[in-house]
């Protein structure tokens, strides 16, 4: 975990987003069981300059309070009834972060994830930011906690390496000038759990080395 913390403390937010591709994300539930998978799709947000960021212009509202905390702080928000996971990536007071958009489930977690998602299976299980949170059974209680030390945490020893990381415009960011088109989305090429993934682009090894 020390290496992951150092990355968060020394790299730019886009560099951290790229580093997170292949990182294992795990939720340790109250009963001691664990659900997890590999991050395959995420987006960098560069507030206060980024017009698409909740912290644009150093906006301070109760909802974005966690964005001003130290690197590794968990920022959760609700959009269209779905809970969305973000990680703060810079020092306290500089509100930048990465939103997690897609997760390839650990095979050991799939049965419970399917149950958590009401019977959904295959890529639709966790190929979107709200879907993966539901699959992992993450609750709003994690707001403001640390992605390094809380029951929702990164597991660097399980990290995978992508053969190719795509750099793409973010999804659903219209009318934001250059911020609409900048390649601030990072994704594991060929992985079936990417948001809006074309079936023809999926590869048998899911894009891992």
Image (spheres, grey):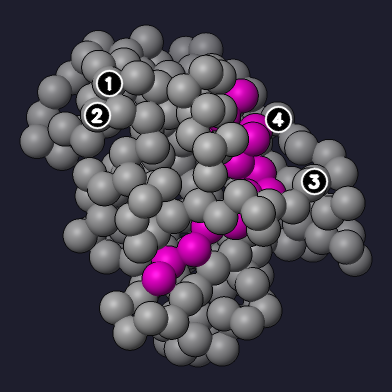
Does 43 appear above or below 209?
above
Spatial distance from mark 1 to mark 4, Cα to Cα?
Answer: 27 Å
Q: Nearer the viewer, mark 3 or mark 1?
A: 1
How many C-alpha atoms fall within 10 Å of the one at disc 1: few (<14), some, or many (≥20)?
some
Q: Nearer the viewer, mark 1 or mark 4?
A: 1
Q: Position of residue 138 (x, y in %)?
A: 34, 66
Q: Earlier in the sequence, mark 3 or mark 4?
A: 3
Q: Nearer the viewer, mark 4 or mark 2?
A: 2
Q: Are marks 1 and 4 in contact (CB under 8 Å)?
A: no
**Which region is colored magenta?**
15-28
Q: Are marks 3 and 4 in contact (CB under 8 Å)?
A: no
**Front-most of residues 176 and 100:** 100
Residue 162, label in figure = 3
**Front-most of residues 146 and 105:** 146
Residue 92, label in figure = 1
Spatial distance from mark 3 to mark 1, Cα to Cα?
Answer: 30 Å
Q: Earlier in the sequence, mark 4 or mark 2?
A: 2
**Which residue corresponds to the image point at 70% horizontal and 30% vertical from the top-left?**
167
Q: Which residue is mark 4?
A: 167
Q: Earlier in the sequence, mark 1 or mark 4?
A: 1
Q: Position of residue 89 (x, y in %)?
A: 43, 28
Q: Which residue is mark 2?
A: 69
Q: Are marks 2 and 1 in contact (CB under 8 Å)?
A: yes
């Amino acid at each position: 975990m020390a290496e992951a913390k150092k990355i968060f403390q020394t790299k730019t937010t886009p560099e951290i987003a790229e580093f997170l591709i292949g990182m294992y994300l795990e939720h340790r539930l109250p009963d001691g069981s664990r659900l997890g998978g590999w991050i395959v799709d995420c987006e960098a947000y560069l507030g206060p300059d980024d017009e698409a960021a909740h912290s644009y212009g150093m906006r301070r509202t109760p909802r974005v309070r966690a964005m001003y905390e130290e690197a590794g702080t968990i920022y959760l928000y609700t959009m269209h009834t779905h809970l969305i996971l973000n990680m703060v990536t810079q020092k306290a007071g500089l509100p930048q972060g990465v939103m997690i958009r897609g997760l390839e489930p650990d095979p050991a977690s799939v049965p419970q994830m399917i149950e958590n998602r009401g019977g959904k299976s295959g890529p639709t299980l966790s190929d979107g930011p709200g879907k993966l949170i539901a699959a992992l059974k993450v609750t709003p209680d994690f707001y403001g906690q640390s992605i390094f030390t809380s029951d929702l945490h990164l597991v660097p020893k399980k990290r995978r390496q992508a053969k190719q990381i795509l750099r793409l415009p973010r999804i659903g960011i219209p009318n934001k000038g250059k911020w609409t088109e900048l390649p601030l989305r990072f994704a594991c090429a060929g992985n079936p759990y990417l948001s809006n993934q074309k079936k023809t682009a999926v590869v048998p090894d899911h894009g891992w080395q």
